Amino acid sequence: MGSYPVSSKNNVWSSKMMSQKDVEEFAAMIAQMQDDKSFHPKYNKKGDKTLPNKRGPNDLEEENARLKFKNETLHEYNKKITEEVIELRKIAEDYKKMKKHLKNAVQQFRNQGDI
């Protein structure tokens, strides 16, 4: 397309004429854009027919889905850690009972004079 210089005499806008080739290319581009929404000479240079359905990082639905996934994952991890803590507390309680029982057994052997 042409430029739009200012006329120095009248201070009126005049347009430079488009060549026949420019007109045909422009008409073809408009026709293709109307038929095919994926056509864009600047952003879709390869002419891919599929439009990407990728949402941007600031899209609220995308952020909501990401946070839901993160929340579910953290809840699963929290549940796993809680079960592990409960199991370790049971083991610690059993250890304390065994320690007390062993101490009592050693004390009985000392009282009987076996040690």
Image (cartoon, grey):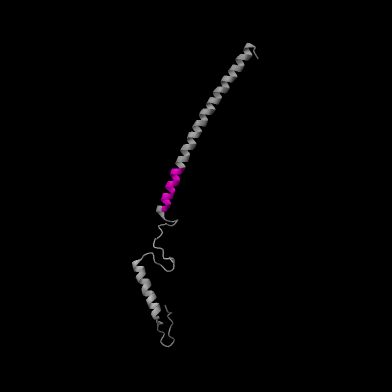
Secondary structure mostly seen in magenta is: helix
For image coordinates 49% across by 32% down, the residue present is: 86
Instruction: Pick the residue in front: 33 or 7.
Output: 33
Q: Position of residue 43 (x, y in %)?
A: 44, 66
Q: Is residue 64 above or below residue 85?
A: below
Quadrant of residue 112 within the rendered picture: top right
Q: Position of residue 39 (x, y in %)?
A: 39, 66
Q: Which residues are magenta?
A: 62-73
Quadrant of residue 50 within the rendered picture: bottom left
Q: Is residue 39 above or below residue 89?
A: below
Query: How many numbered markers are drawn?
Result: 0
For image coordinates 36% across by 68% down, the residue present is: 33
Instruction: Pick the residue in front: 60 or 52.
Output: 52
Residue 17 within the segment the image draws in magenta: no
For image coordinates 51% across by 33% down, the residue present is: 85
Q: Position of residue 60 (x, y in %)?
A: 41, 54
Q: Position of residue 62 (x, y in %)?
A: 42, 53
Q: Quadrant of the N terminus?
A: bottom left
Residue 63 within the segment the image draws in magenta: yes
For image coordinates 44% across by 44% down, the residue present is: 71
Q: Quadrant of the C terminus?
A: top right
Q: Is residue 60 above or below residue 114?
A: below
**Which residue, as the protein is rendered here, is positioned at the far top?**
112
Q: Is residue 98 above or below residue 53?
A: above
